[in-house]
Image (spheres, rainbow, N blue to C red):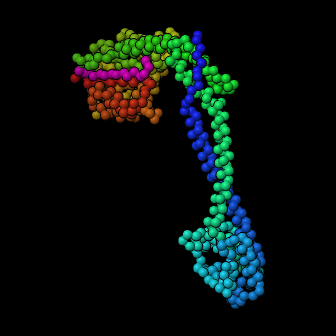
Amino acid sequence: MKKKRIKRIKGRLDKKFIRGLAVLAITLVVAVGLVLAHRMESVLISDYEYVYFGCTRYMASRIDGDLIDDYLKTRKIDDYYMDILEEMRQMHQEFGFEYFYVIVPGEDEVTYVWETTDDPENTLGQTQLIYEDSKDVIEKTFRKDYVEEFGMYRDNAWQVMITAATPIFDSNGEPVALVCIDADAVDIYVEVIRTIANVLGVAAIILIVSIILYYFLINHTIITPVKQLTKGASLILPNIEKEEVFESGIRTGDEIEELAKSIEDIDVQLRDYINTNTRITAEKERIGAELDMAASIQLSQLPGKFPAFPDRTDFDIYASMTPAKEVGGDFYDFYMTDDDHIVLVIADVSGKGIPAALFMMISRILIKNCMQQGMSPSETLYKVNNQLLETDTDDMFVTVWLCVVELSTGKCVSANGGHEDPAICREGDGYTLDKYPHSPPVATMEDIPYKEREFRLSPGDSICVYTDGVTEATNSDEELLGEERMLVAMNRAKDQSPEDTIASIRKAIDIFVDGAEQFDDITILAFKYYGPQ
């Protein structure tokens, strides 16, 4: 075959990669910035706390708490007072606080003892109302078990202050005053932002350079070979009927080269697959046609003409079967064995497909032959059970409800081989399930004795039997219709004809499943007895 080498082409993968790297870079810078901001803020705030509380603790240890009350009473400024003030002013100048002072908290106001930015005569004994924001700081620090942590208060409409405070104790261990430092919060956070900006700037430069270098590496080792593969792959289908075989020419020595070889193999295998798939499709179409034919044959075996007995006025009967997606094994049947007896049958074969449909037809024929020979329902199920077991049933079985109605008296004799409970409607009442122990399904084991159940229908009574496709109809939420909803649907048409009863059930199923796919046949048979009059 002629080999065709694919030329390199230009595309948009590199642009997408660049945009992706740009987004990655921005995301990383923002993420790093947020992490650093949080970390740096904690570190810098801790540094400020170390300095500020170090100063307040030192001055609190230097001041004699027993003298505070005397200073406030006498307003006398002595050498000790001035020494303390001078020491505070030196620290104020060195560290650049906004305010450095000693106060005695009261209930609604504080009284100043020392203050570094004013004359002692104006400071000692001066009072000031407590800021609302400051009360929390005073409550936490002006106590024996004080807590040292930054507090905040608003000094005016635009300035927010950070406060550090340490209590001064007298000789009895009682707090008598607070050493306080106030600093402008803006100054602290400006320092935080400046530090973070510097770190981010360096990180951004390093990140951008790394991404550029990484892009050139990826472009050479991945993007360009991928473009070649894209071009070559796009030519596989157009050349599928030609003798030109795809060859990429990629020799990167890594997974890209392995991918290129895989695509070359796909080019060869695709031709074989198309030929094989053509044959398989034709076979599936043939099988589908056979399944459709099997479904048609299955339906054709069931009584489908209604009214079934137009000359009879002593009863009315109607039945329907809606096959699921696959050919199933449900069936119903009814026929007169003589002028006074009618046989009602409904059954459900286990399994799906053509084997179930064939098993259904065999079961239906065997049951009908036995009943037409005059056997009772129990004798019929006993014989059909053994007949079916004589052949290989592939572990299939059939549930059957079989009943003979004597039309002159309304007497009914039924046998139930593992099928659903029949619903009986008495005149003037509603449908209820006739629950009683069932015999095993047919074709499960040899020589099973099937029990019979006798009951009587009065004029106006009805029977409705069904397969599990009714109660197990499923909606999109995986909920089952169930017996209760089914009985409600039956009773909506309890006084109407069998056809109306089945229509009511079908409508309830359609509303309940709301379009959800069903995987079991839905079969219903309804019989209404009017009596010989």
**Is residue 183 something that shows in the picture?**
yes
As displayed, is residue 384 above or below residue 433? above
Front one among 488 and 109 = 109
**Is residue 268 something that shows in the picture?**
no
Taking the image as shown, residue 326 lies to the left or right of residue 102, namely left
Residue 437 in the image, given as x and y percentages of width and height: 46, 26
Residue 447 in the image, given as x and y percentages of width and height: 50, 14
Front one among 316 and 175 = 175
For the record, the magenta segment spans: 313-329
Please give the name of the residue rendered at 44% of the width and 25% of the height, measured from the top-left corner.
519
In the rendered image, residue 326 lying in the magenta stretch gets the answer: yes
Please give the name of the residue rendered at 63% of the width and 52% of the height, measured from the top-left corner.
33
Taking the image as shown, residue 131 lies to the left or right of residue 329, namely right
Quarter holding the C terminus? top left
Residue 268 in the image, given as x and y percentages of width and height: 58, 15
As displayed, is residue 490 above or below residue 21? above
Q: How many marks?
A: 0
In the rendered image, residue 453 lying in the magenta stretch gets the answer: no
Front one among 386 and 325 = 325
Quarter holding the N terminus? top right
* Image quadrant assignment for residue 89: bottom right
Please give the name of the residue rendered at 66% of the width and 75% of the height, measured from the top-left corner.
99
* Image quadrant assignment for residue 499: top left
* Image quadrant assignment for residue 24: top right
